[in-house]
């Protein structure tokens, strides 16, 4: 069954949150960790390097989110 969310529905955001919840975020983070592990060269595949790369990528993504939020005047950065 496929759920759809209309942008005209004022309750769409709540329906979306109820459908996915924090479990979906956890699953996507774990998948990203796995992808990072698999794409590292074999000689760098260790937990410390995966953590270093994941934190580097996450920090960059959060910085970009803050920069974009300020540039487009969306919410508080």
Image (cartoon, helix red, strand yellow):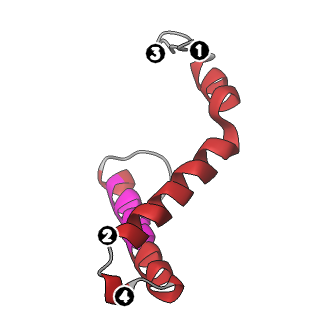
Image position, residue 73 (x, y; %)? 37, 47
Image quarter of residue 24: top right
Circle 1/circle 4 CB separation < 8 Å: no
Residue 32 in the image: above or below residue 55:
above
Q: Earlier in the sequence, mark 1 or mark 4?
A: 1
Q: CA distance from mark 2 to mark 1?
A: 41 Å
Image position, residue 54 (x, y; %)? 45, 73
Residue 77 in the image: above or below residue 46:
above
Of discs 3 and 4, which sits in the foreground?
Answer: 4
The residue at which mark 3 appears reads as: 7
Question: Which residue range is magenta in the image?
Answer: 57-68
Quick one: label 2, few (<14), some, or many (20+) residues within 10 Å? few
Q: Which mark is residue 64?
A: none
The residue at which mark 1 appears reads as: 10
Quadrant assignment for the N terminus: top right
Seen at 48% across and 47% down, the residue is 75
Image position, residue 53 (x, y; %)? 40, 78
Quick one: label 1, few (<14), some, or many (20+) residues within 10 Å? few
Q: Which mark is residue 39?
A: 2
Seen at 34% across and 62% down, the residue is 64
Of discs 2 and 1, which sits in the foreground?
Answer: 2
Q: In this rendering, would 64 be left or right of 48?
A: left
**Camera-nearest residue between 12 and 20:** 20
Quick one: label 4, few (<14), some, or many (20+) residues within 10 Å? few
Q: Is residue 58 magenta?
A: yes
Q: Which mark is residue 44?
A: 4
Of discs 1 and 4, which sits in the foreground?
Answer: 4
Q: CA distance from mark 3 to mark 1?
A: 8 Å
**Camera-nearest residue between 8 and 55:** 55
Seen at 51% across and 15% down, the residue is 5
Asked which secondary structure carries label 3, the reply is loop
User: Please, what is the dominant secondary structure of the magenta stretch?
Assistant: helix
């Amino acid at each position: 069954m496929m759920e759809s969310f209309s942008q005209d529905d004022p309750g769409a955001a709540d329906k979306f949150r109820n459908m996915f919840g924090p479990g979906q975020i956890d699953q996507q983070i774990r998948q990203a960790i796995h992808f990072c592990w698999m794409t590292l060269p074999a000689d760098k595949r260790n937990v410390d390097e995966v953590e270093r790369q994941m934190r580097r990528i996450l920090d960059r993504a959060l910085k970009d989110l803050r920069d974009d939020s300020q540039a487009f005047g969306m919410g508080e950065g």
